Image (tube, rainbow, N blue to C red):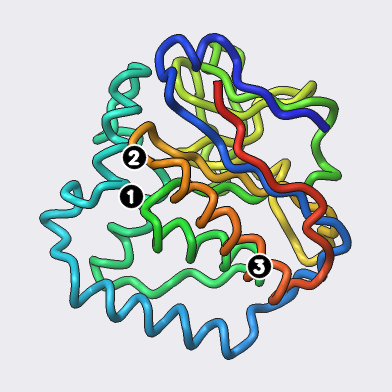
């Protein structure tokens, strides 16, 4: 499977990059108590550290809101997934437990204030591209609503759109039956190369520590 950045994205966001991780033979289950405890402790620390009213002061949130504006997406109407997660947690809501793959994905998204996506690779067909959505790009989101992705950043395969830094689709969602996964980290333009590599390394290590399997490929994709 090849992942590429479409010209429609690189023209508007020339410094945008993706972190890509491919896993094989993972064993997805309920998150172990150790992980749940670590994440709950982190969430409590977040609430002490950040004021919900000043959420946009966080570098990752600020960087992705700026990127959305450059693409033509109103970040107050369509929030980056990382901002939506952080906002929800800082308002006092509990961490939403799904499974050991999705929970780690969401933890790192909140930790770094960056959109993260995790996808069942066996549900994807052909190559993948990050591009700007067209009128036909509509899918059922994980939020249960039909999402129109026209003029928004999205990931697509040969079957069409399946993910984005806003909300992902049900078609590609990771379940306990998923074995081969693709994880995507959406880096805004202000994230330095060394930081990207550090994030990629820590994500891969923790993911395989918890879910087993092998990290078969890990790389940064940029223009």
Q: Nearer the viewer, residue 195 or 52?
A: 195
**121 sits to left or right of 46:** right
In the image, residue 68 above or below residue 173: above
**Quadrant where the image shows the N terminus:** top right
**Local secondary structure at mark 2:** loop
* Tag count: 3
Residue 176, picture quadrant: bottom right
Residue 171 location (% of width, % of height):
72, 41
**Distance in Å between CA atoms under marks 3 and 2:** 29 Å
Which residue has dot 3 on it?
205
Q: Which residue is drawn at 66% across and 67% down?
A: 205
Which residue has dot 1 on it?
83
**Local secondary structure at mark 1:** helix
Which residue has dot 2 on it?
79
**Distance in Å between CA atoms under marks 2 and 1:** 6 Å
Q: Which residue is drawn at 60% across and 68% down?
A: 98
Q: Which of marks 1 and 3 is in front?
A: 3
**Quadrant where the image shows the C terminus:** top right
Residue 67 location (% of width, % of height):
34, 28
Dot 1 alpha-carbon crowd within 10 angstroms: few under 14, some 14 to 19, many 20 or more: many
Q: Which residue is drawn at 47% across and 41% down?
A: 193
Q: Which residue is drawn at 28% across and 79% down?
A: 45
């Amino acid at each position: 499977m090849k992942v590429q950045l479409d010209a429609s994205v690189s023209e508007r966001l020339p410094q945008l990059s993706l972190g890509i991780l491919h896993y094989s033979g993972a064993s997805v289950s309920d998150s172990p108590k150790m992980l749940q405890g670590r994440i709950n402790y982190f969430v409590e620390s977040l609430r002490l550290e950040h004021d919900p009213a000043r959420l946009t002061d966080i570098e990752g949130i600020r960087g992705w809101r700026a990127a959305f504006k450059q693409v033509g997406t109103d970040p107050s109407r369509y929030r980056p997934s990382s901002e939506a997660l952080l906002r929800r947690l800082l308002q006092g809501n509990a961490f939403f437990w799904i499974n050991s793959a999705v929970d780690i994905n969401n933890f790192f998204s909140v930790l770094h204030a960056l959109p993260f996506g995790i996808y069942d690779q066996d549900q994807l067909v052909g190559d993948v591209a990050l591009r700007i959505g067209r009128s036909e790009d509509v899918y059922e989101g994980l939020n249960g609503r039909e999402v129109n992705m026209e003029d928004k950043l999205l990931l697509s395969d040969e079957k069409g759109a399946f993910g984005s830094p806003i909300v992902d689709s049900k078609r590609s969602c990771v379940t306990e039956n998923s074995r081969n996964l693709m994880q995507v980290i959406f880096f805004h333009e202000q994230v330095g190369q060394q930081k990207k590599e550090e994030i990629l390394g820590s994500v891969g290590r923790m993911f395989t520590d918890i879910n087993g399997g092998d990290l078969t490929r890990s790389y940064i994709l940029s223009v």
